[in-house]
Amino acid sequence: MTNKKIAIIAHDGKKAEMVAFLKDHLTGLSNIEIVATGTTGKFVRQAGLEVDAKLSGPLGGDAQIAAMVVEEQIKAVVFFRDPLGKHPHEPDVQMLIRLCDLHNVPLATNPAAAHFMLKGMIEEGKLS
């Protein structure tokens, strides 16, 4: 296992988009361990990619990943959020975002931002 981990999370309406994003970035992610919330992890695994799946977001997965951020185990978070949907675990989502800000962990919430974040981190050697 590598100590270079990124976390991925996607709301239900964004899971297919997350899988497509990961497939488009396989080369850059080849030496990076992917950690995901449970349901996102299932989608990623079904697409044939390796992932360490935690609990589903509403069951505490967002909080598990937030704890990993605080413990400096996560180098970046990619969280494809559905800005139009209602999410009962929104307080956990806000906690994760706050902790990424507090601990200076890059956070991308859409494919364009995630692309540039990963590209920049790989070029700077933070994920290679």
Image (cartoon, grey):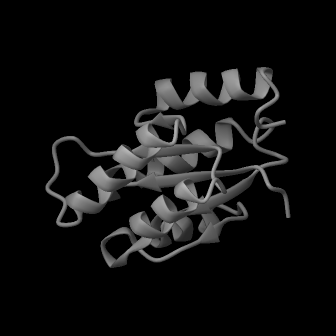
Residue at (67, 65) in percent of width and height: 51
Residue at (50, 64) in percent of width and height: 67
Total number of numbered discs in the rendering: 0
Horizontal relation, residue 63 to residue 18: left or right? left
Q: State whether residue 99 is above or below residue 60.
A: above
Horizontal relation, residue 126 to residue 17: left or right? right
Position in image of residue 93 (x %, y %): 31, 55
Residue at (38, 75) in percent of width and height: 60
Horizontal relation, residue 21 to residue 51: left or right? left
Q: Nearer the viewer, residue 43 or 74?
A: 74
Position in image of residue 61 (x %, y %): 43, 70
Position in image of residue 97 (x %, y %): 37, 45
The quadrant in which the C terminus is found is top right
Q: State whether residue 7 is above or below residue 50.
A: above
Horizontal relation, residue 114 to residue 95: left or right? right
Q: State whether residue 11 is above or below residue 77.
A: below
Position in image of residue 82 (x %, y %): 27, 45
Q: Nearer the viewer, residue 17 or 70?
A: 70
Task: Tell me which corner region of the image, top left, top right, bottom left or bottom right, holds residue 27.
Answer: top right
Q: Nearer the viewer, residue 63 or 122?
A: 63
Q: Nearer the viewer, residue 87 or 92?
A: 92
The quadrant in which the N terminus is found is bottom right
